């Protein structure tokens, strides 16, 4: 199914930074789309992964670790007959999603504040549970594979995208020291290779239907350009944005990758 929506168009409403300058942010979003290269790369990956799934048949979808709800809004618009549940532990994020959904009249978008274990009465319920760049923030032994399996109906799908254990780098690592410090604190669950994530999903009972690396060398360079330009200020960020996005796009050319900075696996509950 072709998801005919514009990635990044909700950024101005969801970003706390952009909400401080609403008119300027809406103008920038219309012209540039995503202003964060990492979000842009993530969105391209997500759209590609959706192409592996029979989306039109889904009626109940759970966004596990939705953050500020970008993909929940996307699917709510693209699949009006489906019910999308945005789940997160962040109270402010869930409140913002609830407010925006009401303002935009998205009656098929629901929210849940709390872990997946706190979703009651929904065992065997969902057609799709997806988690985009969330599991790396969770300790390996606490990752909710088993609970996701329980919440899916037979034949339902779990889609997980997360950073690979080994990361490709191009520019000197000393230029990204503050980011590395953040990773050490936040990415406590960045422990899997592609084969490792496949093995974990199979161990939890899933049949792996799709597994691939994403975000190779070109995408990494695009991210590095975007990151450094953002540190230089908003003007530098916007001036460098077309180049950074082009590099991310170039990375999508060609066939399957032998390595990459992200791993993505789709499993099905038998």
Image: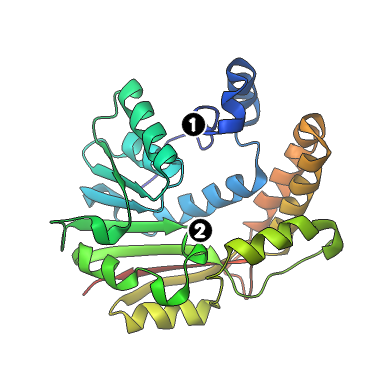
Percent x, y for residue 116? 29, 59
Percent x, y for residue 149? 26, 69
Q: Is residue 51 visible?
A: no
Left or right, 267 with reference to 28:
left
For the view shown, which residue lies furthest in the top direction?
A: 23
* Mark number displayed over residue 252: none
Q: How many C-alpha atoms fall within 10 Å of the one at disc 1: few (<14), some, or many (≥20)?
A: many
- Looking at the image, which is closer to me, 148 or 79? 148
- Looking at the image, which is closer to me, 82 or 119? 119
- Looking at the image, which is closer to me, 190 or 156? 190
Q: Is residue 109 above or below residue 13?
A: below
The quadrant in which the C terminus is found is bottom left
For the view shown, which residue lies furthest in the left direction?
A: 121
Residue depicted at 35% across the width and 41% down the height: 75
Residue depicted at 55% across the width and 76% down the height: 191
Query: Distance from label 1 to label 2 (Cα)?
Result: 18 Å
Can you identify the residue that label 1 sits on? Answer: 10
Q: Is residue 191 above or below residue 177?
A: below
Can you identify the residue that label 2 sits on? Answer: 133
Callout 1: SS: loop
Q: How many C-alpha atoms fall within 10 Å of the one at disc 2: few (<14), some, or many (≥20)?
A: many
Q: Is residue 63 visible?
A: yes
Left or right, 116 with reference to 153:
right
Residue depicted at 29% across the width and 64% down the height: 157
Percent x, y for residue 215? 63, 61
Percent x, y for residue 174? 86, 62
Callout 2: SS: loop
Left or right, 89 with reference to 167:
left
Q: Is residue 221 above or below residue 168?
A: above
Q: Earlier in the sequence, mark 1 or mark 2?
A: 1
Quadrant hosting residue 40: top right
């Amino acid at each position: 199914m072709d998801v005919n929506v514009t990635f990044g168009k909700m950024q101005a409403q969801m970003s706390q930074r952009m909400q401080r300058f609403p008119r300027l942010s809406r103008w920038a979003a219309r012209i540039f789309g995503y202003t964060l290269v990492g979000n842009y790369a993530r969105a391209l990956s997500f759209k590609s992964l959706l192409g592996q799934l029979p989306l039109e048949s889904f009626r109940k979808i759970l966004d596990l670790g939705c953050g500020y709800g970008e993909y929940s809004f996307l699917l709510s618009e693209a699949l009006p007959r489906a019910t999308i549940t945005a789940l997160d532990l962040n109270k402010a994020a869930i409140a913002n999603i609830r407010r925006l959904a009401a303002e935009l009249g998205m009656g098929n978008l629901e929210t849940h504040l709390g872990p997946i274990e706190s979703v009651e009465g929904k065992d065997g319920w969902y057609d799709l549970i997806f988690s985009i760049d969330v599991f790396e923030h969770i300790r390996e032994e606490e990752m909710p594979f088993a609970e996701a399996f329980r919440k899916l109906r037979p034949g339902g799908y779990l889609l997980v995208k997360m950073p690979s254990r080994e990361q490709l780098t191009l520019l000197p690592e000393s230029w990204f020291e503050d980011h590395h410090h953040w990773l050490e604190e936040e990415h406590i669950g960045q422990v899997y290779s592609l084969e490792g994530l496949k093995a974990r999903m199979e161990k939890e009972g899933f049949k792996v239907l799709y597994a691939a690396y994403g975000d190779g060398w070109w995408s990494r360079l695009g991210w590095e350009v975007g990151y450094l330009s953002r540190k230089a200020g908003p003007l530098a960020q916007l001036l460098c944005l077309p180049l950074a996005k082009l590099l991310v796009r170039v990375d999508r050319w060609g066939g399957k990758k032998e390595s990459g900075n992200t791993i993505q696996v789709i499993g099905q509950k038998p």
